[in-house]
Amino acid sequence: MNKFIFVSGGVCSSLGKGVAASSIGALLESRGLNVRMVKCDPYINVDAGTMSPYQHGEVYVTDDGAETDLDLGNYARFTKGRLSQANSITTGQVYDSVIRKEREGKYLGKCVQVIPHITDEIKSRILAVSKEENDTDIVIIEIGGTVGDIESVPFLEVARQMIHEQGRMNAISVHLTLIPEVAGGELKTKPTQHSVKSMQEMGIQPDILICRSPEMLDEPTCRKIAQFTNVDLDAVFTSPNIETNIYQIPIVFSEQKLDQVLLRKMGVECRHTDMRLWHSVNDRFNARKGKVRIGIVGKYMKTHDTYTSLFEALFHASLECGVEAELVKIDSSTIDEKENAFSVLEGLDGILIPGSFGHQHQHGINGMINAAAWARTGKKPFFGICLGMQIMTIEWARNVLNWSDADSTAFSPDTKYPVVSLLQDQVNAKNYGGTMRLGAGETINENGTHIFAAYKEKKISERHRHRYEFSNKYRDDMIKSGLKLAAFTADGALVECIEWGADHPWGVAVQFHPEYKSKPMAASPLFREFIAKCQARDAK
């Protein structure tokens, strides 16, 4: 029988439920168990694809093209289980499915209600993940939002029902709460007490508490929490603030014996644990020497979550290269003037221009073009991803081919030189959700290129999320002027990678998103090579 762990949160959002759930998955995998992860998001959007990066953070894309919550990225970085559309459940998906079934008469004229119809739909999706692969031992279900949110009620009701139906040895509740620090450094447990009380009012008695705190909780504090929440003393754990390396968290939990308590409560034989991989990550983190300064030039620099996978991929690459990567976040709209841009960028060892999304406009684009020009003329390593490849194309067309009007039709529909244009099958698209070039795609690397040297393979698979492409109309002009077309789709129809010539140390831009597949134990090849080139540049 499968085991189920429901991870919920209380007091406030952004406590790190996704990292906590992922760390639990990592601990259980270290004991030889097969784990699958599920995220339940209470929003009514069908998926995260059309949501603002400022409001919701990055969109994580799976191989099958699902646009999901950023926590699936955490699942991918911490655990080994396959992720797909099935691992992301939203209120929008659930209601859409139930309403379609009702319209088709599948409920035989019954009054369709939240209980049992909505909750049964959610349960069926969770159970489908548990049965998708024969060797799945444990399914970890993270419930978005916080207890008390009206949107989360159906998902918490599902947790209550499944704990009752499966039995407490087969389905348990892990609740993450906040222990705030007030003036004078005193830690307050009252918010956690109220959060657990709210869970109990939902009919759920948490089996395990994980308390987010500025520091490790002492025994008297844990005892007080246990007494007021009906949770066993040895089931109260601390998730201390860790600013620099979230991959320490599985080790912190392991040292507190969180995995042992989980297995005992689920009646699973306590297997020998092997945490060597996680210790190796932290050993490499502590062994880093030197620093490279990477300028991240983009449109959404105000919040870290907007580019979570990108920042993590740079961190993974820095571990492999044994160097600290200092990320300098630059709002591209602040360097629209070339002279100002070159002054601001001085002192950086490399430039990275990431992807973007939404109804495109010219705001901030000139700043990115200036950053690309600075890297090209100054012989600094440059890495463009998605929009970054399009920026590299426009900069080359304007400053090398001297097509001053060159642009993307996303920013200038009437440009004389549309060197980046809309995919043909997107021209008349009306819906913006799930209609782009999404998910895994095969790329063929050309011999003698930086991308081939990075992957050491002719054929690779990476994930896409975009509508606009390098315009084939100008292929010959670009090649004749010295731009290298380094990789293509399997049918040769679309350009997947462009590079600056041999006179530049490393200028690479790709249409796909290599950050999605980077892991702390296995950095993305392109990110690794980018950091290595910046490191070599810094050494000079």
Image (tube, rainbow, N blue to C red):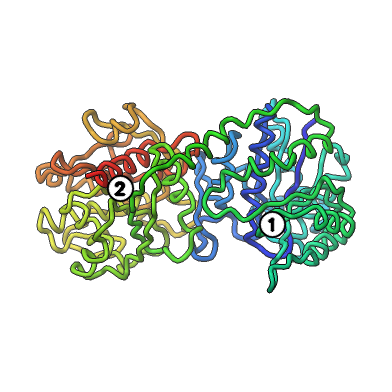
Quadrant showing the N terminus: top right
Q: Amino acid at mark 2?
A: Phe
Q: Residue furthest front?
A: 184
What residue do we see at 32% from left, 40% from top?
532
Q: Secondary structure at mark 1?
A: strand
Residue 154 appears in which quarter of the rendering?
Answer: bottom right
Q: What whole-number distance in Å separates the C-alpha atoms at marks 1 and 2?
A: 36 Å
Relative to 501, say whether 113 is above or below. below
Q: Which residue is mark 1?
A: 212
- Tell me, yes or no, if residue 500 can be seen here: yes
Drawn side of residue 247 relative to residue 346, left or right: right
Tags 1 and 2 touching, CB below 8 Å = no
* Tag count: 2
What residue do we see at 16% from left, 41% from top?
501
Quadrant showing the C terminus: top left
Say which of marks 1 and 2 sits in front.
Answer: 1
Residue 212, image x, y percentages: 69, 57
Residue closer to the observer: 275 or 539: 539
Residue 378, image x, y percentages: 17, 53
Q: Secondary structure at mark 2?
A: strand
Residue closer to the observer: 166 or 354: 354
